[in-house]
Image: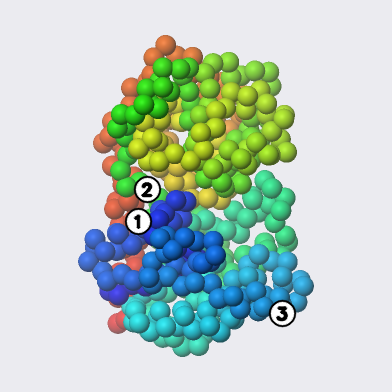
Amino acid sequence: MRILILAPWSFRVPSNGGQLRANAIVTAYQNAGHQVQWAGFYHSAETPQREVWPTDIALSPRVMSTFDGFPAHERRSEMSWWNAVAKTSDNFESFVNTVRNAKPDVIQFEEIALWPVVNRLRKEGYLNGVTIVHSSYNFETLAWRHRATATADVTPETLLSISEYEREISQECDLIVTVSEGDAQEFRNIGAANICVAPNGVTAPPCASGNVMGAYMSSRVPYAIFVSSAHPPNAHGIVDLAAQVDGHPLLHGEIVICGKVGSLMRTSLQSRKAGRILERCRYLGWVDDAMLGVLYADARVVILPKLYSGGSNLKTAEAIASGRPIVATRLAFEGFETSVDLPEIRIADEPNEFWNLVDQYLSADQITAPRSPDATKSLLWHNCLQPMIDAVTATQQSLST
């Protein structure tokens, strides 16, 4: 098959969960023998050229004038910007040319943002005979409601637009790929008929490679590790869970915070109330993969304190594959329910119970032995994405006969 993948960002240098999954999807299709082309949509003023593929599509400066021409109530929706992308002639022509050059049997768009573009391509006849696949990273109607709960910065117009997008996608796309059975059921509830679940995974388990920082960390107090990008629901999850504790359930060690989530945690409205936990946090910021492997290897426990839906849960896959003990909320294991019963994985949604479990690992005399690598083979990307490849192949074949 000839497959064209469209993404609302470039993923040449992947950093966030969506980019990592998109990269893995391209590799999985290629390894299965399919011809794959892709185009990420990017803002040239914000994206270094070294992070852009030659096939990527740059934002047209005319998009803003298109957006400014929308009625005020439409501009209050964050999704209206993507409607403007679809309606801006030179941007849309770039997508048309990409489709013409690729001559795809299948077009797959990552996340919902590019639905207005794909929908216009479909309505104007550019995708006749092409199988249309939506690659979903969340059921966004629910995820954005949770985001509104966590940050209170989501307009009602945005929530309405997202709900409309997903209903249209459910009715018009030939196949929807989700990362969890829960998301799949939400799509079924709004009329989707052909759904495949392909969970998130890892390229390889994070592993230690010997590092001065690793020796420095292990020579200090025992630590738990929390890894996250600057994703608001993740930041609010750990802070809110910390703010809800009674007394001082965390008496030992410290929490090492890796990734760009730290700045959001420190500026959270609940940060003062969460001080009994946050005062034990050490913020390292972004660390490279080698360093992260060392930090995982020496951690007493990995914490996944997720209270709000949304995000790819890639860090859950990474945490499981690391072999370290995990203390997590049940929501953090959305899409990874089959791994909950693995050794040294503890699920706790009640704040005091959560932090008491963390403290038990930090106060232990020695580090817990890692889980067997055999327990995490199913988390490798090529295993996780095989159901997607099978479903796309079957859907394309059934529509072409």
Q: Nearest to the eye among marks 2 and 3: give it.
A: 3
Residue 265 occupies which quadrant of the picture? top right
Task: Look at mark 3 in the image and give the residue it sits on.
Answer: 69
Circle 1: residue type: Ala
**Residues under labels 3 and 1: Cα distance?**
38 Å
Q: Residue placed farthest to the right in the image?
A: 72
Circle 3: residue type: Gly
The quadrant of the rendering that contains the N terminus is: bottom left
- Residue 131 percent across, percent down from the top left: 39, 76
Circle 2: residue type: Gly
Residue at image x 68%, y 26%? 275
Secondary structure of the residue carrying numbered label 1:
helix
Is mark 1 in CB contact (under 8 Å) with mark 2?
yes
Q: Nearest to the eye among marks 3 and 1: give it.
A: 3
Which of disc 2 and disc 1 is earlier in sequence? 1
Secondary structure of the residue carrying numbered label 2:
loop
Image side of residue 283 versus residue 271, left or right: left
Residue 201's disc is: 2
Label 1 packing within 10 angstroms: few (<14), some (14-19), many (20+): many
Task: Look at mark 1 in the image and give the residue it sits on.
Answer: 24
Residue 365 occupies which quadrant of the picture? top left
Label 3 packing within 10 angstroms: few (<14), some (14-19), many (20+): few
Image side of residue 87 versus residue 393, left or right: right
Which of disc 3 and disc 2 is earlier in sequence? 3
- Residue 165 percent across, percent down from the top left: 59, 69
- Residue 342 percent across, percent down from the top left: 37, 32
The quadrant of the rendering that contains the C terminus is: bottom left
